[in-house]
Image: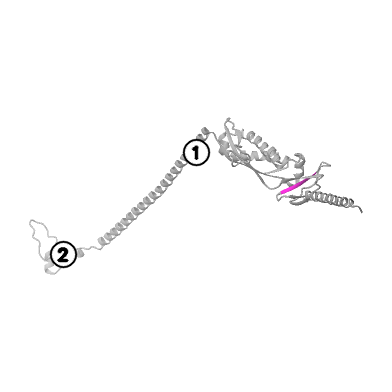
């Protein structure tokens, strides 16, 4: 064996090892790329690049095996998503003033803070992928949730006065907007959970007018309360006065009845007394009160008592 053949064999072996290592790394890379993790709260939609078809059904959270050379996977959230369009940039889904500008039926401009809750319909996630060309959920959210809301809200709000938007018809308007958006979302494979108007921002002039109205209503309510309390007090005083009058009347009737009873008793006693009086009884009573002295009379008056009979011990019949 020649000395030159040894280095050639060594180089050949090294080359072989390098190729084997490269193939191993390639296979490892392909294998690693074949395994994808679907996050909790998401479903995975597999797209075949060769046939341009979407795999039937959605992959559940966990590990999924795909062919990285011919297939791609897109995740869509199926949990409830929140999207806020508000005046304060720190609270909305988009930076800056993102509130919805509307015009009332009188032409007054108002700003609405709205909050939307929605979710991807799980069984239609594949159709969503096809309709939107595999777009990310952020694209779908912007084109559907944001754009349709900003279109439908002003259209419906235009049928209400600014005062109705602020207070009396706000719930009704919210219901109408919810019904329209729910239909639009459903057509695009989204489920509208809720739509709410969180706050209404008024121009300074309208805000002052509203404050004045609220103050006037509060004063009216206070006056109504005071009048009601006065009425209750008057009714209470009336009841007390009636009670006192009835008590006085009852007392007077009682005293009158007592007087009548006493008079009747006195009258009956007088009748009995009159019936019991006889000349002899009268003379006896007079004698009981006589002090034994004969009265002196001048003229021809007849003494009240027959003294001779008293002195003689005989009584006049």
Q: Where the C terminus falls, by quadrant?
A: bottom left
Pointers 2 and 1 in contact (CB under 8 A)? no
Q: Position of residue 28 (x, y in %)?
A: 80, 51
In the rendered image, residue 45 lying in the magenta stretch gets the answer yes
Q: Nearer the viewer, residue 98 or 165?
A: 98
Specify the principal SS of the magenta part: strand
**Which of the 4 quarters of the picture holds residue 172?**
top right
Give whichever of discs 2 and 1 has the lower sequence position: 1
Q: Which mark is residue 214?
A: 1
Instruction: Return the residue found at the far top.
Output: 107
The residue that mark 2 highlights is 289
Apparent side of residue 222 relative to residue 110 in the rendered image (left or right): left
Q: Residues within 10 Å of mark 2 (few under 14, many from 20)?
A: few
Q: Residue furthest front?
A: 3
The image shows residue 236 at horizontal and vertical percentages of 41, 48
In the image, residue 162 sits, relative to residue 257, either above or below, namely above
Q: Is residue 144 visible?
A: yes
Instruction: Please give the label number shown on residue 72.
Output: none
Q: Secondary structure at mark 1?
A: helix
Which is more toward the observer, 205 or 228? 205
Q: Tell me where residue 307 appears, x and y as whole percent.
A: 12, 64
Q: Is residue 1 above or below residue 316?
A: above
From this viewpoint, which residue is outermost toward the bottom? 313
In the rendered image, which quarter contains the N terminus? bottom right
As for residue 305 lying within the magenta part, the answer is no
Percent from the top left, x then y, of residue 72?
A: 78, 44
Question: Which range is magenta?
Answer: 42-47
Mark 1 Cα-neighbour bin, 10 Å: few <14, some 14–19, many ≥20: few
- Coloring scheme of the render? one colour
């Amino acid at each position: 064996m020649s000395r030159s053949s040894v280095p050639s064999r060594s180089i050949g072996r090294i080359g072989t090892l390098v190729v084997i290592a490269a193939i191993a790394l390639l296979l490892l890379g392909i294998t690693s790329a074949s395994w994808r993790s679907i996050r909790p709260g998401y479903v995975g939609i597999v797209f075949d690049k060769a046939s341009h078809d979407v795999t039937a059904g959605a992959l559940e959270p966990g590990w999924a095996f795909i062919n990285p050379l011919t297939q791609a996977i897109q995740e869509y959230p199926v949990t409830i998503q929140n999207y806020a369009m508000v005046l304060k940039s720190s609270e909305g889904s988009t930076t800056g003033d993102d509130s919805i500008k509307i015009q009332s039926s009188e032409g007054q401009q108002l700003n609405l803070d709205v909050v939307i809750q929605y979710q991807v319909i799980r069984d239609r996630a594949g159709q969503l992928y096809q309709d939107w060309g595999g777009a990310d959920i952020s694209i779908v959210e912007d084109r559907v949730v944001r754009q349709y809301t900003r279109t439908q809200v002003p259209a419906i709000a235009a049928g209400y006065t600014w005062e109705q938007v602020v207070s009396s018809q706000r719930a009704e308007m919210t219901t109408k907007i919810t019904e329209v958006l729910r239909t639009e979302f459903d057509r695009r494979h989204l489920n509208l959970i809720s739509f709410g108007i969180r706050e209404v921002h008024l121009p300074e002039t309208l805000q002052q007018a509203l404050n004045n109205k609220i103050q006037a209503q509060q004063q009216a309510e206070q006056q109504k309360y005071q009048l009601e309390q006065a009425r209750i007090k008057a009714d209470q005083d009336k009841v007390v006065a009636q009670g006192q009058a009835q008590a006085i009347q009852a007392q007077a009737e009682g005293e009158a009845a007592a007087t009548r009873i006493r008079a009747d008793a006195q009258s009956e006693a007088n009748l009995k007394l009159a019936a019991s009086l006889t000349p002899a009884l009268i003379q006896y009573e007079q004698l009981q009160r006589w002090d034994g002295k004969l009265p002196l009379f001048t003229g021809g008056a007849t003494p009240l008592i027959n003294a001779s009979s008293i002195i003689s011990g005989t009584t006049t019949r």
